[in-house]
Image: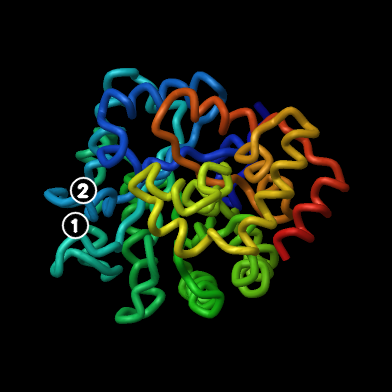
């Protein structure tokens, strides 16, 4: 599998990143191990998680996903050939949130312990923190990079304005810069990223690893009616946002192209992201090894110019 450079980070990743937000939530540890095994056996090498996964589950406190990944890394002995990306800053408790320097320096230790590793390949600001200057988290990351605990840094859920400010601060103060951006982006959710953030990323050579590449499962085609929304824990939110004329028009195009190529709608939706200029690799999650194989096949799917035009038109 030909890997792609992630910005100027020095990290190389396959064109698909495994999202670990479901680990410890809709996938228990045994299931998560099978998903991870299938992913790396199929050529994947980058896994995205966060301290905040899965704090939304009753009884969880955050870090559940990292813990499962750490147990898998230790059991399989795969640390050296896996790119681990995790995030800091999402609120896991009223006194545990944000991007202050002190908080980042404290919180990284928990992530390292749960992941059972000495270093994090890509440490990301999970969401912007407007209560601190954009340079403050960069100062924390500079210390962590110097200590060998972090290799590169990235941003998630930043506006174009704040991302630009952070890049300027990095240059002005000799601080490490965000080498990747993790935005919301898929065939349905295009406009904000393409209009505001993509130009910044292309100008500065920032890698892009978008989340919700399958629109919370909608672009797999599993949700086509109100009755379908009962199929999973995510169904309600999916229906409220995506089950409309625009969404169904995209599904129709995915159905036609996937039928023509002998692929699945999910594979076509991910291959479309992989083919976009400036995009490094979409993030997608799975709760079974069969789902993983479906996702992995997207890395081998080549869309024609006609396919891309049809999808662009349907999703415009």
Mark 2, residues whose alpha carbon is within 10 Å: few (<14), some, or many (≥20)?
Answer: some
Q: Work out whether residue 36 or residue 89 is closer to the camera in this orientation and state it.
A: 36
From what the image shows, is residue 104 above or below residue 21?
Answer: below
State the CA–CA distance, disc 2 to disc 1: 6 Å
Image spot of residue 257 (x, y percent): 77, 40
Q: Nearer the viewer, residue 255 or 140?
A: 255
Q: Check disc 2 and report its element: helix, strand or loop.
A: helix
Q: Which residue is mark 1?
A: 106
One can see residue 157 in this view? yes
Q: Residue at x 37, y 61 (%)?
A: 126
How packed is label 1: few (under 14 Cα within 10 Å), some, or many (20 or more)? Answer: few
Q: Is residue 195 left or right of residue 153?
A: right
Residues at marks 2 and 1 touching, judged by CB atoms closer than 8 Å: yes
Residue drawn at point x = 15 percent, y = 63 percent? 93
Q: Quadrant of the N terminus?
A: top right
- Please tell me whether residue 59 is drawn above or below residue 195 in the rendered image: above
Circle 1 — which element? helix
- Residue 136 placement: quadrant: bottom left
**Quick check: 80 left or right of 195?**
left
Res 68 quadrant in image: top left
Residue sitting at x 80%, y 34%? 260
Query: Would you name the residue on which mark 2 appears?
Result: 109
Residue 116 point in image, percent of width and height: 24, 33
């Amino acid at each position: 599998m030909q890997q792609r450079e992630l910005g100027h980070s020095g990290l190389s990743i396959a064109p698909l990143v495994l999202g670990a937000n479901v680990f410890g939530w809709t996938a228990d540890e045994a299931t998560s191990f099978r998903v991870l095994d299938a992913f790396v056996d199929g050529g994947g090498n980058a896994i995205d998680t966060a301290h905040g996964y899965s704090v939304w589950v009753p009884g969880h406190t955050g870090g559940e996903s990292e813990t499962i990944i750490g147990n898998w890394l230790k059991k399989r002995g795969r640390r050296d050939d896996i790119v681990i990306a995790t995030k800091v800053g999402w609120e896991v408790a009223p006194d545990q949130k944000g991007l202050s320097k002190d908080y980042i320096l404290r919180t990284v230790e928990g992530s390292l312990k749960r992941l059972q590793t000495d270093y994090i390949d890509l440490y990301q600001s999970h969401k912007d923190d407007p209560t601190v200057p954009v340079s403050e988290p960069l100062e924390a990351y500079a210390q962590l990079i110097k200590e060998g605990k972090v290799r590169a840094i990235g941003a998630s859920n930043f506006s174009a304005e704040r991302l630009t400010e952070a890049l300027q601060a990095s240059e002005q103060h000799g601080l490490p810069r965000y080498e990747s951006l993790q935005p919301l982006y898929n065939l349905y959710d295009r406009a904000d990223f393409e209009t505001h953030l993509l130009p910044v990323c292309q100008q500065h050579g920032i890698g892009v690893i978008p989340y919700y590449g399958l629109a919370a499962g909608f672009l797999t085609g599993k949700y086509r009616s109100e009755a379908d929304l009962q199929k999973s824990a995510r169904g309600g939110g999916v229906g409220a946002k995506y089950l409309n004329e625009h969404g169904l028009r995209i599904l129709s195009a995915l159905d036609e192209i996937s039928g023509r190529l002998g692929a699945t709608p999910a594979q076509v939706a991910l291959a479309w992201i992989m083919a976009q200029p400036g995009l490094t690799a979409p993030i997608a999650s799975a709760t079974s090894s069969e789902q993983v194989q479906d996702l992995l096949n997207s890395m081998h799917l080549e869309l024609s110019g006609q396919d891309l035009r049809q999808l662009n038109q349907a999703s415009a």
